[in-house]
Image: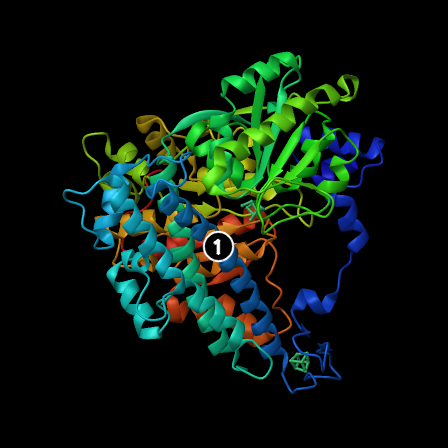
Amino acid sequence: MDETKERSVDPATQKLLKRAKEQNIVTVWDRFEVMRPGCKFAQQGICCRICNMGPCRITKKAEQGVCGANADTIVARNLARMIVAGAAAHSDHGRDVAHALLLAAQGKASAYKIKDEEKLVALAAEYGIKVEGRKKEEIAEDLANKALSEFGQQHGELRMALRAPKKRVQLWKKLGILPRGVDREIVEMMHRTHMGVGNDYRNILTHGLRVALSDGWGGSMIATELSDVLFGTPEPLTARSNLGVLAEDKVNVVVHGHEPTLSEVVVEASHDPELLDLIKQNGAKGINIAGICCTSNEILMRHGIPVAGNFLQQELALVTGAVEVMMVDVQCLMPALASVASCFHTKLVTTSPKCKFPGVTHVEFQEERAYETAKEILKLAVQNYKNRNKNGVEIPKENQGLVAGFTAESVFNFLGGRYRATYRPLNDAIIQGRLRGAAGVVGCNNPNTRHNYSHIEMAKELIKNDVLVVVTGCSAIADAEAGLLQPETAFKYAGKGLQEICEAVGIPPILHVGSCVDNSRILITLTNVVNEGGLGEDISDLPVAGAAPEWMSEKAISIGFYFVASGVFTVFGTPHPILGSKNVTDLVCGGLEEMVGGKFAFESDPIKAAHLMIEHMNKKRKALKLKPMMYE
Ligand code: SF4
Ligand code: MSK
């Protein structure tokens, strides 16, 4: 098979990989080849370098590190630190959104307005904030302060974790893993995994569950909910995806990373009359904002801004030669972007004080001057248009239509109908055997797996078997690029039962519910399904499963752990780096189920992985004594 086809199933990606090769531009796939076969010790999680007596590696001859730590301890500590890093990244994102809401409420950040008052009031009630007779800004200020205080909270419980089904909350309390404060759990894990502290792998990973819960039901959920308050709760909308969304005759600005705080304002500032004049003066037909990774998903969900690509396509967007500015914020940004950008006229612009690249233009984002910052970056792009080598541009044609913008609330309205806002029809469809269950397919790309292949094939196999699929992050983008996020997908690929539902409601069988932090929307949806009744008393009773078939990030590990800790069976494409400890592997892929009702499995074949999920759903259906599947 042609090398580019081995690397990706996406034709646009294949074309640009050829172009990169012709121009001697090194990409992530080339660097991956150089790194192969990789360090066996790291892959199995049995190297430790957390103190200066090491580094230590566990072998047959050396079953303990210098301090006496064995494989179980070393593997558990390494895994725990991955959970911590992932939870920290998501939660710091949540903190930034809460901070922006606070400044907006105090009138210190004029670029932001409170867009979803209904959600503001609902959240205020949840947090015990008085609403009657108060201005929305006053309520928002209290809400932002309450949310911010949950990061450093030392005692008590995270408010949003109490949203989980009653039985689940009781279980977390019994196990001592209901999170107290977000930063509290993260710091404690760094302590627990310091040299010479915990060496009981079970105890270390039990706290790992608590850290992950502080992400999913804490930092990430705060990020999602407060973003909805500030930027508006998404509603279903149509848009386009893949590298073909870049424009030949317009100024292309690609936003990349995770946080919506600046990109939201960039979208608004792109209509500024001064900028439109400048565009004309520079001979362009307009300005085209497009996104990569989850910054993209954020502004796609709320504004229908086109998606240029997912994680592995970030360098290739620049290889088109058509990008004037790539504006990056935080997370999933390859350091290699700087060298690829330097092969073209593209200006790479960093914006977060947390994320600078050496020698790269930095325009620092502060919420108080968000509009000015956005405009400054857009001006840089417009002025750079004249430097584009018009004969050196290659934009692939591929760009697919999609429907996005689903949330826990819109599933409510869609399936229940506008006047019957209820999950009843969804639950009934599962109970009657029209729908087998639901699956969340999420996470990254990784050059160790053919780009987009596993996401697409897994989603198709699931819907074929009457499983409603919800997607986020780069998985959602993979499906979008394959044209799967459209209602027609139901007729092409879905089983008869799912097809009937999609036809009746007018939705695709694969629902895009947002960015990586928006996995919290899936937790809320699952809780709503439990609360609606008829499908057990806890998330672990439901015929549902999760998957991250092409994962690469520590955030994926944290997400996986909070799903498992919430009672969801979760399949990862490649294993966690834990196989060097049988005990840890048995716990993660077995013992956790007894504890929290969820566990992991590792399976690299997406079809086999889908069937592990389907078998799990069948097992849960049987336990609930549900009717047989209608069309089997
Ligand atoms: Fe080696 Fe123990 Fe130090 Fe780790 S903590 S590097 S196993 S001596
Ligand atoms: S962007 S975390 S590569 S999904 Fe959220 Fe994609 Fe994974 Fe980053």
Q: Position of residue 54 (x, y in %)?
A: 72, 79
Residue to which mark 1 is pinned: 92
Q: Residues within 10 Å of mark 1 (few under 14, many from 20)?
A: some
On the picture, is 344 further left or further right than 542?
right
- Relative height, residue 236 to residue 187 (above, below): above
The residue sitting at 71% across, 69% down in the picture is 41
Location of residue 144 in the rendering, given as x and y in whole percent from the top left corner? 34, 50
Q: Nearer the viewer, residue 246 or 72?
A: 246
**Placement of the N terminus among the 4 image quadrants:** top right
Residue 145 occupies quadrant: bottom left
Vertical relation: 494 (above or below) 599: above
Q: Secondary structure at mark 1?
A: helix
Q: Is 498 located above or below residue 591 in the figure?
A: above
What residue is rendered at 56% in x and 37% in y? 478
State how the image is colored: rainbow
Q: Amino acid at mark 1?
A: Asp
Q: Is residue 397 left or right of residue 508?
A: right
